[in-house]
Each structure stands twice: as C-alpha cells, then as structure tokens.
Image: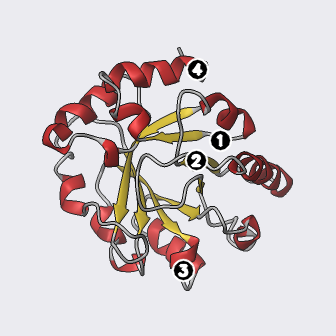
C-alpha cells in the first residue's frame, strides 16, 4: 500500500495541533518532521520540543527527517513512543553505518536521505542497515519547491536496486509532491510520499489527504 506523510513544515504553526489532528484523522500514515539546522541546509525550522508538544495528541506516528550536521548528537532527542523512523542524510554522516546502528539502538527504524545530486551508489554498503531510503526530489532547505523531474528515474533505479539485492526497505520521496505528479511518483516505485504545501496549503488539509488517498488507490 502506498503511504502518505504530510510535512508539518508547511502547517500553520498557530494551529499546529489542530492541523496535525485533522490530517491524521483523514488517513495520513505518518507526520513528516522536517528538522533543519541552518548549517547543513540554509534554513532553520524547529527542534524536538515542538515535535514532543504533539505527543499528547492522537496523531499519526512520526517520520523524523534530520537535515542537520552531525546528527548523532540529537537522535535521542527525537525518539518518543510515537517515533517510527529517524532519517539522516548520507551527506551529513562521516560514519553512516555507525549512525544507522545508533538510530536502531533506540528501538526505532533507520532511514537514509539522498540529496538530488547524490548517487545511489553511496548506499551500496549500507543496504543491510536501512529500513527506508528517502529520495529528495528538491534540494533541501525550503518548502514549496518544484519537483526535480529526473527524480522519477532515480526512484525507479532505486526500486531496481532493492529488488536485485533482495531487500525490503521502503522508498520515500520528499519535495515538490503534488496532486499532478503523485501517481507518476508512486508508479516509479515510491512507497511513502511526503507532501507539505500540497496538503497544508489547501483550504482543508484533511480533505486534501483524502484526495491523495484516492489518487493512490487507497480509497
């Protein structure tokens, strides 16, 4: 089944609790938590305190995406009972397999993200260690960017790599996902689609999640 993970980066933070409940009740599989440090990417978003403020709400599980330098320092801060995935960037990790093991030591699933210009070959030696690979279909740092079209071929190639290696990690795609391209992205091999402004920029984020579900054959 294809899954949907609205990115709270694009939510109205004056109504954050209300909006994450709305998209969760509408069928979102995860809440995508985009954490940016102003160093690895040219923007600062929020830290663990904001994420943990949602713990008391009946929301979808957390899919944490750390766009930060030296992520090992902060992984523990983003692990709660609602955290399912913690994803780090290949480009930000000096010892990637060690970082992935560090993530799993907290009892959560590990993910690796690749920027648009980063080759899939950088994953060849960690495929046994990952539960998810996140393909960035925009250059990270800001929401609302346009989808980079050659990401479709990269997603399809990753799917082939997964099949050839006999692995079962999930493929997630983040950046520029819209109603117009979501079917092509899913058909290329994406299992989880992250949508930010395409969900929270709608008059009704919950209804928009349901529209995505219909396009993906979920409803």
Disc 2 and disc 3 in contact, CB within 8 angstroms: no
Q: CA distance from mark 1 to mark 4?
A: 14 Å
Disc 1 and disc 2 in contact, CB within 8 angstroms: yes
Disc 2 is placed on an element classified as strand
Location of mark 1 (residue): 190
Q: Quadrant of residue 25?
A: top left
Q: CA distance from mark 1 to mark 3?
A: 26 Å
Give the mark, 4 or 3, whose residue is nearer the N terminus.
Answer: 3
Q: Residue at x 73, y 74 (%)?
A: 125
Location of mark 3 (residue): 98
Q: Is residue 79 visible?
A: yes
Location of mark 4 (residue): 215
- At label 3, counting other C-alpha atoms closer than 10 Å, the crowd grade (few under 14, some 14-19, many 20 or more) is few
Q: Is residue 87 left or right of residue 96?
A: left
Residue 105, position as x, y percentages in the image: 44, 70
Relative depth, front residue between 158 and 130: 158
Disc 1 is placed on an element classified as loop
């Amino acid at each position: 089944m294809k899954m949907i993970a609205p990115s709270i980066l694009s939510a109205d933070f004056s109504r954050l609790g209300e909006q994450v409940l709305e998209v969760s009740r509408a069928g979102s599989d995860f809440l995508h938590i985009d954490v940016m440090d102003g160093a690895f990417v040219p923007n600062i978003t929020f830290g663990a305190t904001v994420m943990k403020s949602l713990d008391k709400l009946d929301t979808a599980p957390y899919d944490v995406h750390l766009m930060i330098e030296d992520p090992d320092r902060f992984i523990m801060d983003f692990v709660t009972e609602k955290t399912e995935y913690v994803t780090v960037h290949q480009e930000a990790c000096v010892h990637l397999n060690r970082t992935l093991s560090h993530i799993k030591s907290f009892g959560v699933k590990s993910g690796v993200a690749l920027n648009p210009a980063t080759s899939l070959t950088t994953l060849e030696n960690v495929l046994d260690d990952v539960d998810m690979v996140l393909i960035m279909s925009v250059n990270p740092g800001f929401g609302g960017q346009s989808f980079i079209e050659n990401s479709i071929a990269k997603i399809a190639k990753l799917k082939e790599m997964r099949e050839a290696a006999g692995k079962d990690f999930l493929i997630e795609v983040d950046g520029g996902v819209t109603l117009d391209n979501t079917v092509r992205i899913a058909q290329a091999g994406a299992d989880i689609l992250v949508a930010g402004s395409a969900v929270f920029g709608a008059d009704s984020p919950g209804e928009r999640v349901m529209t995505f579900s219909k396009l993906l054959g979920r409803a």
